[in-house]
Image: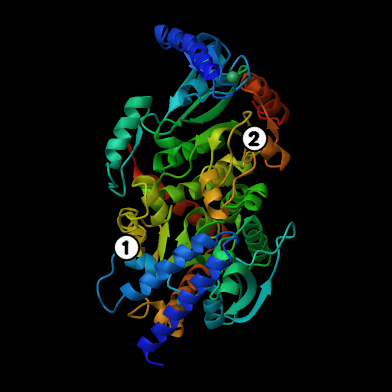
Amino acid sequence: MPESQAQSAVVLELTRQIAELEKSSDSEAAQEEIDRLRGQLEALQRVGTGAPKDAWDRVLLARHPQRPYTLDYIQLLFTDFTELHGDRRFADDAAIVCGLARFEGRAVMVVGHQKGRDTKQKLLRNFGMPKPEGYRKAMRLMQMAAKFGLPIISLVDTPGAYPGIGAEERGQAEAIANNLKEIPKLAVPIVVIIHGEGGSGGALAIAIGDCVLMLENAVYSVISPESCSSILWRDWQHKQDAARILKLTAQDLRGFEIVDEIIPEPPDGAHTDHAHAAALLRPRIESSLRELSALPAAELLHRRHERLRKLATFVRES
Amino acid sequence: MTWFRREKKALEVPQEKRVQTEGLWVKCDGCKQIIWKKDIEASLHCCPKCNYHFKIGARARLEILFDGGRFTEHDAGLASTDPLTFQDTKSYRDRLKKAEKTTGAKDAVITGEGLLEGKPLIACAMEFNFIGGSMGAVVGEKITRAIDRCIAQRLPLVIISCSGGARMMEGAISLMQMAKVNAGLARLDEIRKPYISVLTDPTTGGVTASFAMLGDLNIAEPGALIGFAGPRVIEQTIRQKLPDGFQRSEFLLEHGMIDAIVPRKELRGYLARSLELLGAWNDQ
Ligand SMILES: [Zn+2]
């Protein structure tokens, strides 16, 4: 199928999904997703070829409806994927997938946020917004990985942790906080890949690691440009300004040393060629794992702590 | 009509009085009654009629906590570098200056060491009037240093939270503070010194999702708003009104998220007793 034809097929599909979601307006988070889909439509029309990309272009690319999702990367990069379910306390959260797998023949634990492609999948995956049980499942399995000496590979792609009644009742804040305190203790290598949206604490809860890779068009931010715009300008019209001032691109985060390495994408973005995007990522995961596996456990934990500690450089004595 | 007129007239009297004695009377947010300010101050800024807990500043918090209101402040000079050179309708630098002027602090937390019933501890208190008590690099660093001091000196830790969450104007750097502080707490676990988190109104976002919900004991003041997402965000997402009392201290106690609700005037006694029971000073 020529690209323009493929593109108009996606436009039709998105328009159909918006109409579908508008009908089921009582479903939680539907409104936000509708806005997001409209943004994706805008992305398709706006993000062209070759032109220099501003921060907002990156936001649109990071949310592109055809961008590879975590399960796509799992399929392209791993073998023997064996999905594991449930937090053993309340439920299985489909917005986070976890499982055992092999990377270049070596057994590893994979965790990651998962978005849905069609309406049914979007609802099942709750638009990639985890609830506490998702973070607790990830923690349970990361601890299991440490128990059996398996490196952890984390694939980050979420608009954020889900803000809902049940999520609050079951301790969304505590679930995220606990991951942030327990992940630093795991004595196995952790490679984090921010491949789509790094939405605030909801992303960070599985994004602590020894090596943080970020795709060229991924974004990572404390708040969405839309919410930032509505706080500062009282409307969503300044989302492009907000995207710019929040410094949320891979380049920005590399500059702050929050990210270790920027992973290039195919020329027009990861959505144009999933296999190519995965092929560009594979050697970087491979080299990070090799390097980290050579470190004694104590050294690994020490370095992980220092990574976080050095963010102290953003203060001054006055 | 007559009824309305009469009511209006009846209301005018206290209002007139209030104008004449401006600054001496405060309307309680809890019971809506007009209370003499001195009465509120005398009861640690709680309403003598309904026990509503008024917000108080970080310095006042630490003065209430420590014996004789005395403590040695740490890292008072630490200030933001404005790492994003953030500028919206105003510049972040101007916001920082204004906040410093209003609060007299360089950022949204005060940390220090002092005595509680004669026993040493380190405490941090957040300042809501400093950009909503938000956590950027300075708050993250000061709290992490407080944790480091607890580890070095083998002292217990108390953090009194009051915050809207991570500080937007420091972007992903604010986000990383959550990870940094919690990595510190992971190390505090190793030395087996207690950390008590005191949650006050309001504590939400990146502060609950990092250190505030992870005390060995989590205790809250009565009626405090505590949650991950703010109530407005949740209402917008689920498009329905939230039930009364949702995300209040009493709700959190019922859902198993906190150990106890402790009124302000009982805080010192509660902390001293529980820290003693946990063996905080056994090796002193
Ligand atoms: Zn009252």
- Residue carrying label 2: B249
In this view of the protein, can residue A196 be seen by the observer?
A: no
Q: The disc labelled 2 sits on which kind of residue? A: Ser
Tell which of A272 and A175 is nearer to you.
Answer: A272
Q: Residue furthest left?
A: A51
- How far apart are labels 1 and 2 at the CA level? 40 Å
Query: What secondary structure is marked by label 2?
Result: helix
Instruction: Determine whether, in the image, residue B161 is placed left or right of residue A84.
Output: left
User: Callout 1: few (<14), some (14-19), or many (20+) C-alpha neighbours within 10 Å?
Assistant: many
Tell which of A235 and B177 is nearer to you.
Answer: A235
- Residue carrying label 1: A55
**Relative to residue A29, is residue B117 depicted above or below?**
above
Instruction: Determine whether, in the image, residue B156 is placed left or right of residue A241.
Output: right
Tell which of A237 and B105 is nearer to you.
Answer: A237
Indicate the position of residue A155 as horizontal and vertical percent values: 52, 68
Q: Residue at x 49, y 12 (%)?
A: B9
Q: The disc labelled 1 sits on which kind of residue? A: Ala
User: Callout 2: few (<14), some (14-19), or many (20+) C-alpha neighbours within 10 Å?
Assistant: many
Indicate the position of residue B126 as horizontal and vertical percent values: 48, 32
